[in-house]
Image (cartoon, rainbow, N blue to C red):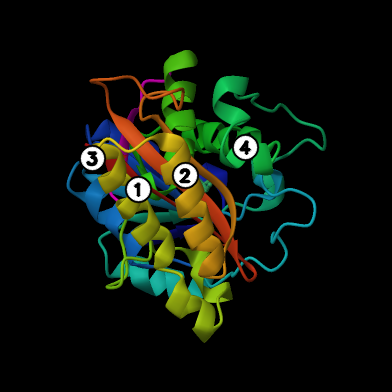
Amino acid sequence: MHRLTDLVRLRAILDHWRLQNERIALVPTMGNLHEGHLDLVRHARRRADRVVVTIFVNPTQFGPGEDFESYPRTVDEDLSKLAATGCEAVWLPAVDTMYPLEAGFAVRVPSQLADCLCGEFRPGHFDGVASVVLRLFNQVRPHLAVFGEKDFQQLLVIRRLVLDLSLDIDILGCPTRREADGLAMSSRNQYLDPEQRAAAPALFQTLTGMAKRLQAGDDWATVESEARAALVRAGFRPQYLAWRSAEDLAEPKPGRPQRLLAAAWLGKARLIDNIALD
Ligand code: PAF
């Protein structure tokens, strides 16, 4: 497995693979890898000849007061996990490789996608995500890239980026990996103390309970307010509980894919989750 910190070397390896007509997959991450990330790598592995994983804690997607400084950085452990998962190259760029100019170009995500749900509570977050992912796409020029459905809004932002800027990259979503008790895997779960960890699966349980009630015909306002109250009783500080189109996050359309999405603080951890509504 190549461990790369130099863009020229990365490009030389990628050029070599392309000359051999090999299909290249990209899996962007911020490191501190868990089984959810490794699922993305396995998903990519099945669809490409070569998998490139990137590890870069991207400063432009963190807002003031967020956890950029304290975000867990565990590169050595990450590299051991990746070596066992069939990834051929790990791209570990420095900040000035990703952002060579102090006030460089940035992507502005359309407001309908960027300013709702997580974007309402993390202004500028999706511009930062799209800006770094576009740079990674330009550096690696993959045939396909894999993103987790846990960050469902991010997945839609990336799909829109590729569509709008005519990028020739297939974007694949990978189902959320959960702990045995239903909690979606996340690097931020480690911010939970034991009591909070025991309460944390309530977020997923709340979403599944909401789905059942909506399918039974209960009205949204009642379902939402009772779910919010249940989360507060479990110790959460909910930010949003939303029922949206799975295609564009607008109001759900009958007969089209729909999604229930939630974000809530539990202690120092901001947890997000979402499920499909069949
Ligand atoms: O999902 C993440 O880990 C990040 O938002 C990403 C896509 C690697 C961009 O920094």
Q: Identify the residue at horizontal 73%, vertical 64% (top origin).
A: 69
Residue 277, quarter of picture: top left
Q: Position of residue 41 (x, y in %)?
A: 30, 54
Give the SS element for disc 3. Answer: loop
Judge from the rendering whether residue 36 lies leftward or rightward of residue 129; answer left or right: left
Image location (x, y in percent) of residue 187: 50, 66
221 falls in the magenta region: no
Residue type at tag 4? Gly
Residue denoted by label 3:
216
Q: Pointer 2 and pointer 1: residues touching (CB < 8 Å)? A: yes
Does residue 68 appear in the picture of this structure?
A: yes
Which residue reaches farthest bottom?
Answer: 194
Q: Residue at x 36, y 45 (%)?
A: 149
Q: Earlier in the sequence, mark 3 or mark 2?
A: 3
* Amino acid under disc 3: Ala
The quarter of the image holding the N terminus is bottom left
Residue position marked by numbered label 4 in the rendering: 119
- Badge number at residue 210: 1
- Image quadrant where residue 38 sits: bottom left
The residues colored magenta run 167-175
Q: How much space separates mark 4 and mark 3, taking CA atoms?
A: 30 Å
Label whose residue precedes the other's in the sequence (4 or 1): 4
| Residue at disc 4, secondary structure | helix
User: Is the shortest distance between ligand 1 and the CB of mark 3 under 8 Å?
Assistant: no
The mark closer to the camera, 4 or 2, is 2
Q: Where does residue 168 sit, x and y in percent of width and height?
A: 36, 21
Task: Confirm whether the magenta stretch covers residue 172.
Answer: yes
Give the residue type that dot 1 points to: Met
